[in-house]
Image (cartoon, rainbow, N blue to C red):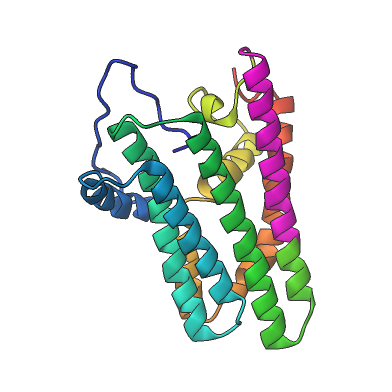
Amino acid sequence: MPGSPEPAADAPYRLIAPTQLFPLTRHLSYRLTLLLVQTPITPNQITALSMIAGLAGAFCFAFGTWDLSVVGGILLIAGYTLDNCDGEIARLKKMSSEWGAHFDDLVDWLVDSAFFAGLGFGTSTATGNMIWLWLGMAASFGATIDYIIDLILQAKAKRDPAQKTREQEATNVRKPEDAIDWLIYIFHKLSRADFCVIVLALALFDLAWILLPFGAIGAQAYWITDLFKRARGWHT
């Protein structure tokens, strides 16, 4: 997964049990990984299952009903949990690959974009107000811009070893020092932690629509602060 330190090439990867409460999905993925590693399933197959669960969850939100939104939230948790498992399985089985990493990034983008589009469509249908659809599309657009930026960084890193991808940079981040640094840190590190759990919790109270204005603004802030972070020399 992004931000995980890579072990030495000749050192076996060890799955370490989570010691902190958050993220909650890490507790689920740890136990699921222990089961999946004993099966013939491959990391890319797990990523595909993560995509199916995530997209199915997004589709459920498009109906705009309470019961299907709850089902969608559960499916998103399943997708996020599997998304944690694929990288762990890849390292445990020594099956890591560049294609697998790109596939994982693609799935992350597809699920994030589809969720906000589905939630926007469903809320718009339920309320008869098109503003919710536009908010959902704005959030999806922001997620797409962020994915494109990631692709550009990966392409630059491939052409020039001196360039760093986000995953490589994540292992060399300095401590936030001022308000702007903390704002960037929150958007990039904390906003995605257990997002699927937040979705389910809100869906249970029929409040998932609250995520649309936050998503529409936050998605833009995510990629804008990423560019601003680079301009400030966040990474050494």
Residue at 48% x, 25% y is 171
Q: Looking at the picture, does residue 202 appear above or below residue 106?
A: below
Question: Do we see residue 143 in this rendering?
Answer: yes
Q: Measured from the top left, where is residue 202 in percent x and y?
A: 50, 73
Given residues 77 and 21, the one toward you in this image is 77
Quarter of the image that includes the C terminus: top right
- On the image, the x and y values in percent for residue 114 come to 62, 62
The verdict on residue 129 being magenta is no
Left or right of residue 192: residue 62? right
Is residue 174 visible in the rendered image? The answer is no
Q: Position of residue 32 (x, y in %)?
A: 27, 52
Q: Quadrant of residue 121?
A: bottom right
Q: Position of residue 59 (x, y in %)?
A: 57, 72
Q: Name the residue rendered at 32%, 40% in the picture.
A: 89
The region drawn magenta spans 138-162
**Above or below for 201 versus 18:** below
Check the picture and name the quadrant holding the N terminus. Answer: top left
Asked if residue 157 is positioned above or below residue 18 in the image, the reply reads above
Is residue 131 positioned above or below 111 on the image?
A: below
SS assignment for the magenta stretch, majority: helix
Determine whether, in the image, residue 3 is placed left or right of residue 154: left
Task: Determine which quarter of the picture holds residue 102.
Answer: top right
* 184 and 91: which is toward the camera: 91
Residue at screen point 66% across, 14% down: 160
Q: Is residue 104 left or right of residue 220?
A: left
Is residue 143 on the magenta stretch? Answer: yes
Q: For this rendering, which residue is in front, 31 or 229? A: 31
Q: Residue at x 69, y 22 (%)?
A: 156
Count up the numbered dots. 0
